Image (cartoon, rainbow, N blue to C red):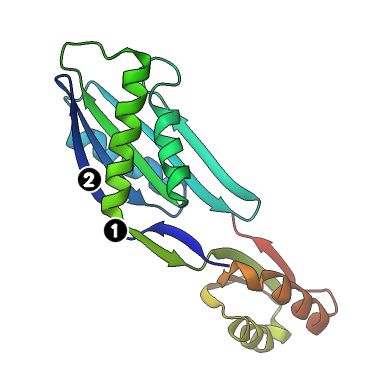
Amino acid sequence: MLLLTPRTPARSELRVRDSRFLASALPIANEDEARRERAAIGRSFPDATHHCWALRLHTPQGERERQDDAGEPAGTAGMPILQAIRAAGITNTLVVVARWFGGTKLGKGGLARAYRDAARAALAQAGVVRTVPILRLMVCGGVALDGEARHLIARCGGRIDGAFYAEIGVVRLTVSLPEAAADRLREELAHLSRGTWKVDIDS
């Protein structure tokens, strides 16, 4: 399975009846990264009247979506931005739209169109790339099978990011693995270790 994600961070500006909308579209890997990026955009444009946003993240359980009107009338900012992300068919995406109020009210319909159009333009600028969804896993078991477990992880296309020997006779491996290979790794590792090695999603 491949995901469509933004190719590169991008910005686009839209002006509607003296209000300025500056949309930033970015690829993100998780919500922590999204919070950092929103904070950075807020620091970059501290004089903006609003910083409205939406995100879409791929998870093993499905797409996770969040949005925030950030003080605009309910449903006029965050949801239109999210609709633009959905319409682009992409995930692992954050769009933040900074607005500077120009003195003329746009009405709910006008606001929603402006936020959606600004988000669409930034997403178009960002482009699209196909990526393989990656899981972060914690693989744990007895050190006697450490080497064989590492070879199996490699055969499944995984990468070992860290190893911890916190308990006597037990190794904990943090692993990055293509999501599609997770079931194979669980099954083959269970067979290899007779169920003594465990694979869990790393929180």
* 119 horizontally vs 161: left or right: left
Point out residue 136 in the picture as x, y percentages from the top left corner. Answer: 56, 63
Tell me whether the residue at label 1 lies in contact with that at label 2, contact meaning CB atoms closer than 8 angstroms.
Answer: no
* Image quarter of the N terminus: bottom right
Q: CA distance from mark 1 to mark 2?
A: 10 Å
The amino acid marked with disc number 2 is: Arg
Name the disc covering residue 11, or none.
Answer: 2
Q: Quadrant of residue 38?
A: top left
The residue pinned by badge 1 equals: 8
21 relative position to 161: left or right: left
Where 149 falls versus 50 (above or below)? below
Q: Residues within 10 Å of mark 1 (few under 14, many from 20)?
A: some
Nearer to the camera, 91 or 114: 114
Q: Dot 2: within a 10 Å radius of its alpha carbon, few (fewer than 14), some, or many (20 or more) residues?
A: many
Q: Position of residue 76 (x, y in %)?
A: 40, 21
Residue 87, above or below 60:
above
Determine the residue located farthest toward the right in the rendered image: 194
Image quarter for residue 110? top left
Residue 79 appears in the figure: yes
